[in-house]
Image: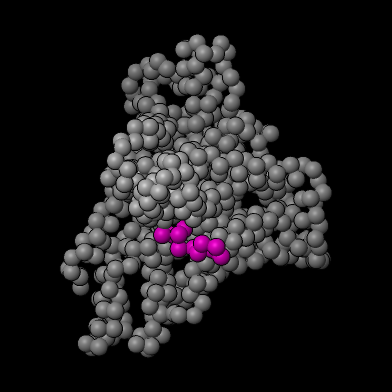
Amino acid sequence: MSTISKSNKRLIYPALIWFCIFFILPLMIIFIYSFTTDYIFSGGKISFTLNNFLIIFQKKYYLIILGRSLLISAITTFFSIMFSYPVAYYLAKKTRFDKILIVVLMIPFWVNYLIRIFAWKLLLSENGIINQFLLWVGIIHEPFRILYTQTAVILGLIYTYTPMMILPLYATILKIDSSLIEASRDLGASRARAFFDITFKLSFTGIFAGTLLVFIPALGSFAIPAILGGTDSQMIGNMVENQFAHVGNWNFGSAFTLTLAVLSIALILFYSKIFGLETIYKSREF
Amino acid sequence: MNKRKPVFLTIYTIGFFLYIFSPLVLIFIFAFNSGEGYNFPLQGITWHWFIELFSDKTALHSIENSAVIALISATVSTILGTGLTIGIIKGITKYKAFLITALLLPVLMPSLTIGIAALVFFRAISIPLGIPVVILSHVSISISYVFLIMMGRIEGIHLEIQEAAIDLGASWFGSIKDVLIPGLLPSILAGWLFAFMISWNEFIVTYFLIGTDVTLPIYIFSQLRFGISPKVNVISVLVTVFTLTAAVLLAGSRKIYQRIKTGNSYPG
């Protein structure tokens, strides 16, 4: 038995070595970059510094981008919970076709998100379909401008990441014992009270798992603000891309990237401490 | 359960599905519209944009690159990921939770962080950017997805069968090759398809690592930034049809898996 385990154990090494070299090691390198003054491998003088981080908090411009990114991601997460909760509830408790509907719901998710964002651009532009329709109906008399604003970015993010919210929500609501709700109704609770005190509270695990799956990628998004947003809606991703592609300050860019990484790792660890990570990978409809 | 018909919830859910699907429908319609812009009323049906796409060298080249990258990285990460899964479930006992948490990072961390870190890493060790580097990085991400998919589907498959095989005289290698792998085959296939789709759709990491070359998502992104041609719609139609086929295959592999799980027809 134990000799078999020992032999089996060897099977993890090829994957683990690959993972450590091409995933973990790069993260460690940006960690070093973040705390040093010059390119490490360029041969210049290297010294330890906290400046790369201090700039983020000293320059108003960077603080605004950081704050805006957090705010946009929070709004996105909030609305994806609101939009997807009824759907998740319906799928989990009110229909027999939930399995097939979940598969159908995931179809657009597999189509490249750039293409889906492109569709939103068509919908939102000044002579786009929504404006054309509203003008034709007569609700508005001149096209309203929504493309290249923060609203457009938020709409795009909600659309892109909401399916990620539905899956964990559905999985946790599915597990809630319906007899608990019946019992509370028999004991005199109103339908609303039964929902908020039982269903809603018991689905917290799903809400938090969904929050991780929506908030983190939204915070790190780069293509969506680049396509749908204007100058007032640039997020961390666009700033970081700019540092690496145009400005060329890699140490500062690394510091910003590391901030993002630490923020997401902290959220993940916080979540796994409270709920355990199984809920995340088991609830994803792989 | 509540016996009342949930009218409002049903309508809301239908509306939600329309919301999710309408952008795709829109793109399909305009892929066949003969007009240049994106305005209603539609002007007529045409294959013109399909023909235009297939005479666009950059577009074809990007599709080819994406296919090569996705095929190689899916295959490599499935081989590595299968070993990893068997090793973690049937090998190690120590540090298991730590390992699983670390393996979740590529799934949960923003792609931006992964892409930037990889860019800095490859530049630091002076490896030129391009397709090989993209593949190295895609594999390091996809290993996690393959692992998670296999973990999610492995319950109910009787892995003790390996010990039985060895008791009956099989070698260790034989017990993996002839006993475990055939049983895991549906989840291995699912893992491969998933890894393929991850790599095929991957944009941000590729964007930072591809250098001057081009993949399909990179091509689409550049088209979106500099004026919109209905060629993008045609690509979307083709990609969607391709994706649907893959999704059906994925669902099919799950059916086979269910059959193995419920019936006793253990292959091998």
Please state if B230 lies on the left or on the right of A67 as rendered.
left
Q: Is residue A277 magenta?
A: yes
Residue A246 drawn at (x, y percent): 70, 45
Tally the numbered discs: 0
Between A155 and B208, the residue placed more toward the observer is A155
Q: Residue at x 64, y 56 (%)?
A: A263
Q: Residue at x 53, y 36 (%)?
A: A156
Q: Residue at x 47, y 17 (%)?
A: A133
* Residue that protrudes farthest toward the front in the picture: A187
Where, by quadrant of the figure, is residue A148 drawn? top right
Please state if A145 lies on the left or on the right of B146 as rendered.
right
Q: Is residue A209 magenta?
A: no
Between A13 and B17, the residue placed more toward the observer is B17
Where, by quadrant of the figure, is residue A142 drawn? top right
Between B112 and A265, the residue placed more toward the observer is A265
Query: Which SS does the magenta portion mostly show?
Result: helix
The quarter of the image holding the C terminus of chain B is bottom left
Residue A24 drawn at (x, y percent): 58, 67
User: Is residue B219 at least partly visible in the picture?
Assistant: no
User: Is residue A59 at least partly visible in the picture?
Assistant: yes
Residue A179 drawn at (x, y percent): 34, 53
Residue B214, above or below B43:
below
Residue B231, above or below B1:
above
Between B142 and A65, the residue placed more toward the observer is A65
Q: Residue at x 58, y 35 (%)?
A: A153
Residue A43 drawn at (x, y percent): 77, 66
Please state if A72 lies on the left or on the right of A79 as rendered.
right
Q: How is the image coloured?
A: one colour
Q: Which residues are magenta?
A: A272-282
